[in-house]
Amino acid sequence: MTEGTELARPKRAAPRRKRSDRTTQSAIDDLKKAAAPRGRKPTAPSKSGTRGARDTAVPEPDNSMDLDLPGFEIREMPADLRELGIHLDAESDRRNRISDSPDSGQNETTQERQRPAPKRHEVAFDDGRIDSDAARVVRRLTRSGFEAYLVGGCVRDLLLGFRPKDFDVATDASPDDVRRLFRNSRIIGRRFRLVHVLFGGGKVIETATFRRAPPQDDDREGAELLIRNDNEFGEAHEDALRRDFTVNGLFYDLDGRHVLDWVSGMPDIDRRTIHTIGDPVIRFQEDPIRMLRAIKFAARLDCGISEPVYDAIVQCRGSLAMAARPRLFEELLRLLRGGASHRSVFLAWEMGVLDVLLPELASFLSDQPEDGGLVWRMLQRVDELTKERGEPLSDLVLCCVLLLEPMLECCENARDRMKMAGEFLEPVIDRLNVPRRIADAMRRIVALLPRLESGRGGRFQRTSLYVDASIVQGIRRDARIVPPLPVEEPEDDSQPEGRVAGRSKRRRRPRSGSAKTESVAEPS
């Protein structure tokens, strides 16, 4: 009897389970209210049925299953769903960035109205000229609902008839979205995050999110114009307008096969002219490195520099001292690597930029002839070797060739050549942040160059530095061979054929017995 009574008790306790369910439901509702962000109403699902990262509705609680309480505040679509092919469309993702931007008070209609329409130029490039992996990156982004274009130097080189060195992609997808789409990628950068999509053979397709220029104040002057923060996301036209030169602000739509031009870059492509986007003085004060980039593009692409840009470089050259020293050294090497070092250095010297970067070299060049100087012939030989090899020479060789003659002049008749070369390089190291490994190697090459030229290398030939030193020696040897000047034709037509101009006729000794006859015949 006792056992039967104990078995019947669960049936009488059944109604209490319903009351416990109501208690659980009220507790869940309280937890939902506590977990919801304050001052923000839950967002209802969009009418079109597309659910974005910010439009995801809060799911209704199900009493038949265990609830994961952190899931009440869903802000992004899970990564596994994206990998299955469920991606946000471009319109929904653009709304999310607008709502997260500082100008989120403006509605979507205002943002769309402020976006200018680009000039579209129909250009069909051969598929063989466009990298297949870069095209794959662009098409996967567009199929996933994002906006993506080929941008920058690759579009410029294709339009000018050159072979692009690399291909860059710009998109409205965030770095995390790009990382989810491409497993063979990695996010790099601290100041501004980029995505490197990796392919075989060490190929890297750099994929960046659209950026916009920082807000500008018209009252800024001098050092206040220097850009120190450039990491704000933006739209496609804002990304084009923030770039440095018009020829670099062109976007190419692969599917539509046309160039998008927000910056009037196509006319400058046709004229082969380097011109800044906006006032050149302001743009150079914002980033002084742009002056070196203008020289590099003009020399490497065989283009001219517009008159306002030329005058602005002469005016703003002193602001190069405010630029980061590692960037100055890297950009100086790029002037020498592209196979146009002779013209690059000549433009920098002509516009006074070399007086700021390397005053030691600028003063030395002032005493040399512009066409026949040894430094200019050495730079011409560097360009020839770069084109023959298909790749640039090492950084050590380039730096050594550039400063070799001033250093040799400084070390002339010095007892300790290595010490004198070090004293010459010390201010250059401080000014351009030259790595010590390059500076020390330059000192050794300059100190041992006379022995190498005389064929007395000794133990130095067994060191790893001997290869670069022999290249420097060969460049200097070839440059010292002055090509013969063309022989001018004599003005006197009566001069016998075969006689070399400027050479005196050999006087013949008179034969014996005929001197009297020749002396009589001379007056006639």
Image: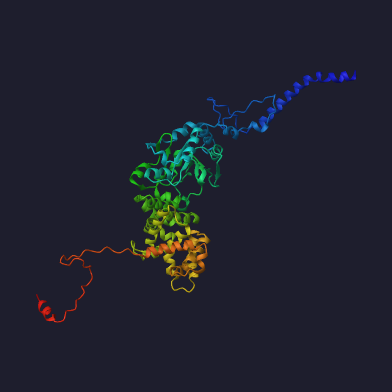
Pick whichever, 493 or 28, lies toward us: 493
Residue at 42% in and 49% down: 282
- In percent of width and height, residue 430 lies at 50, 61
Assign the N terminus to one quadrant of the image.
Answer: top right
Scheme by which the image is coloured: rainbow
Pick whichever, 485 or 310, lies toward us: 485
Q: Is 486 situated above or below 61?
A: below
Q: Which quadrant of the view contains residue 121?
A: top left
Residue at 36% in and 44% down: 269
Which residue reaches farthest right?
Answer: 1
- In percent of width and height, residue 209 lies at 50, 40
- In percent of width and height, residue 142 lies at 48, 34
Pick whichever, 448 or 423, lies toward us: 448
- Horizontally, residue 392 falls left or right of residue 11, namely left
Assign the C terminus to one quadrant of the image.
Answer: bottom left
Pick whichever, 219 or 263, lies toward us: 263
- Horizontally, residue 238 falls left or right of residue 369, namely right
Q: How many marks?
A: 0
Q: Is residue 206 visible?
A: yes
Q: Is 308 situated above or below 379?
A: above
Q: Is residue 78 visible?
A: no
- In percent of width and height, residue 522 lies at 11, 76
